[in-house]
Amino acid sequence: MHGPSSAPIHIAHTGVPPLFDVARVDLQSLFLELSPRDSIRVDTRSGDGAWLHSYKARPLPRAVPYGPYAIHLADGQGRFRWMCFDLDSSKGDTGPDLATLLRWLEEAGLTYVVAASGSAGGRHVWVTAATPLDAVLVASLAKAAALRLPTLDHGLLCNPATGAVRPIGAAHRDGGRSQLQTPFDQERAAALLTPATCGNVSDAFVRLALIIDAVPAPPSVRVRMVREHQVEVLDDELGPRLPGTPNPVLDDETYKLLTRRPADDQVSEVLASLLVKLALRRWTWPMVERLLSERRHREGALLHACTSTRRGPLRTLLTDTQAREKLTRQWERCVAYAATLPLTEDSLEWTETISDVVALVEQVQQAADAMPERWATESGPADRAALDLRCLLALRSGTTVLALDVRRAALATGHGRSTMHRAQARLTLDSWLGARTSDGPAGTHELLPVTASHPGFILVARGGTQGTPPPVGERRATLISRLQTRLAAGQADVFSYGRPTLSHAGGLGHHAGRVYQQLVERAERPLSLSEMCELTGYAPRTAAKHLARMRDVMVATRAVMTVHHECPTCQAAPGERCRTAAGTVLRRRGVDQHMARRTLAADRSGTPYYRPRPGSLVAAAKVLGTYGRLAARARWYAVEIELYRWWQQEEAWMRAPKQGIRTGIQTHDEQAALTLTTLPRQPRRRYPRGADGRGDHQAAKARIERRIATA
């Protein structure tokens, strides 16, 4: 591979006179003269004179500062004059990444200046733009390069407001200065650092984006994605925070992270992980600030905020004011990052909208349970399963507007994708769901509140103000457990509609699955046939038929309650003896029970009760010949999804411009060894085509099926 100094660099002759005198070139003075802003960032000192690596904004000086300082890369409008690739030696060996980066720049036709940053092995690669670059393009280049260059610190290129770098010749806090490496001639380096003589036009940066596969998204798409997936950050008297009620109780993992001393090479990572966890728990800045008052916290996860590094692993204690300022900056960054993350199960219970979601799901479930005949029709089991799945996802996500594809719904309920599609359409017609096709992807529906307009709706009184309802967290956990149990029972292969053959009788069907769901939900006590008919809406003859078939394959069993019964006369609990009005044990000629209790026991002894046997579901499915039906369906859907994704990639490749784009692994012409840093993109898999040049979807499906392991 060519060395950094052997690459030919061509300076464009633009006819514009240089902005400096080449006879008296001073790179530091040049950076101050070309600074895009009228301010710089200067490092501050501690009481003992040590540099704190805490840069403050200062007006642009006339003379070069004595200590460490940094020059802004972008102007006040967010347009970058320089791109500086900072290769940090603390993240690994910078040699391979530097060679890869320089090869990219040479392929794009960009000129550059390489400098040693001052730390051992660190490198700064300066690339000047003849025309200021947009922040979106620079951030896309930086993020794409960071995926392929492990030692690249790309944060300064993604922050046009405060992104700054120490110029060539500036002092380092640990001693030494940033020194010029390529080119060796300072006059030539000054020409390459000046926009008028660098020769780096905007098209060259676009070529660089194509080389490293960093084409930015359109601004409209980018803004819409941020608004959809990013939570609003509140900034008031409580500091930056996420909206919601704070959860002050820490789990065991977070508490251990807070109180245990981190490893020497993970001090900053541990602090960032802790602050993100606290932000998701809706903590405020005063709550975080109080953690500094305890020594075990300062020596634990807050060690990075309370100390600073001078050289090597040695750390210097900061004053209380400095530690608070440093923790404030870290808290702002972590809150902004936590706003882009999905809500966790722990943080979701403390949001402001989860109580409304729980109340809506409770209302929907009560209304659905009040009309069991609606779900006893031919399509009833699929409709109720689709409704229960929407309720479960609403409780987990904290929102009633959900985008759910039919294949995912089919695998979660045990039905087919076409069945789920028709079930969602029926629920929409009955006002259980509301389609949101105008402001979301296909399959987006909103869970609607129950009103008197629902067909067959029966209003159930809840008792007014009698009693205190349980907390939202307990109600949500109870609903999630109930819906999970119900959907898991419906997924069993034994309740699929398998075709009967000479050796197998086929599945029991989803109507039998509805009966089994009621048995599983109330597994703490057996259910009678009359209770089963009341809960499911089936006629006694239909319910008895399903129970008999389940008993034949030992999925359900019959139980007779003849041992212990409560007493309607003295209200004695099951297992207790009856008592007289005076409180003494009833003993009258050997009879220790009231007549009403004996009558109740006789009636119950003649009434059959049923219990579920969950351990027999797999064996029953094997007997009926339906075992593996859900796994086969999941494999089939995976093939369909992969086939559709492959064809979308093929269509995108057909529409993309082909000039200047290479496919496959790209390496330098004279490179002998292949390294991971020279893989800008994976090879494109060609879509199978027939003799007429059209896509052969059957051949593509056959290839995907061969790659996916069979069940």
Image (cartoon, helix red, strand yellow):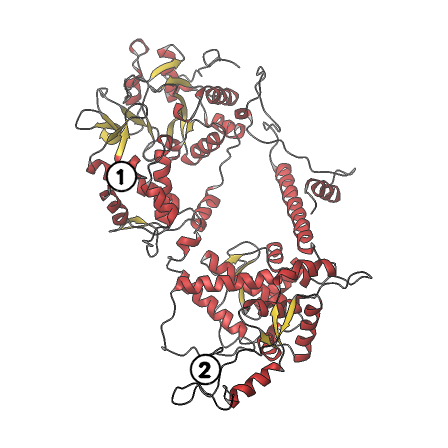
Q: Residue at x 41, y 63 (%)?
A: 474
Label 1 secondary element: helix
Q: Residue at x 51, y 69 (%)?
A: 365
Q: Which mark is residue 385?
A: none
The answer to whether 321 is drawn above or below residue 446 in the figure is: above
| Mark 1 / mark 2, whichever is N-terminal | 1
Q: In the image, which is nearer the foreground, mark 1 or mark 2?
A: 2
Q: Count how many numbered circles sit on residues in the image.
A: 2
Q: Which mark is residue 298?
A: 1
Q: Within the image, what quadrant is residue 336 found in?
A: top left
| Residue contact at pointers 1 and 2, CB within 8 angstroms | no
**Camera-nearest residue between 26 and 596:** 596
Question: On the image, numbered disc 2 is attached to which residue?
Answer: 572
Residue at the limit of the structure toward the front, as seen here: 589
The answer to whether 550 is drawn above or below residue 407 in the figure is: below
Q: Position of residue 681 (x, y in %)?
A: 57, 31
Q: Position of residue 173 (x, y in %)?
A: 27, 22
The answer to whether 503 is drawn above or below residue 330 in the figure is: below
* Mark 1: few/some/many CA within 10 Å (<14, 14-19, 20+): many
Q: Is residue 38 visible?
A: no
Q: Within the image, what quadrant is residue 70 found in?
A: top left
Q: Residue at x 41, y 79 (%)?
A: 463
Residue at the limit of the structure toward the left, as seen here: 47
Q: Amino acid at mark 2?
A: Ala
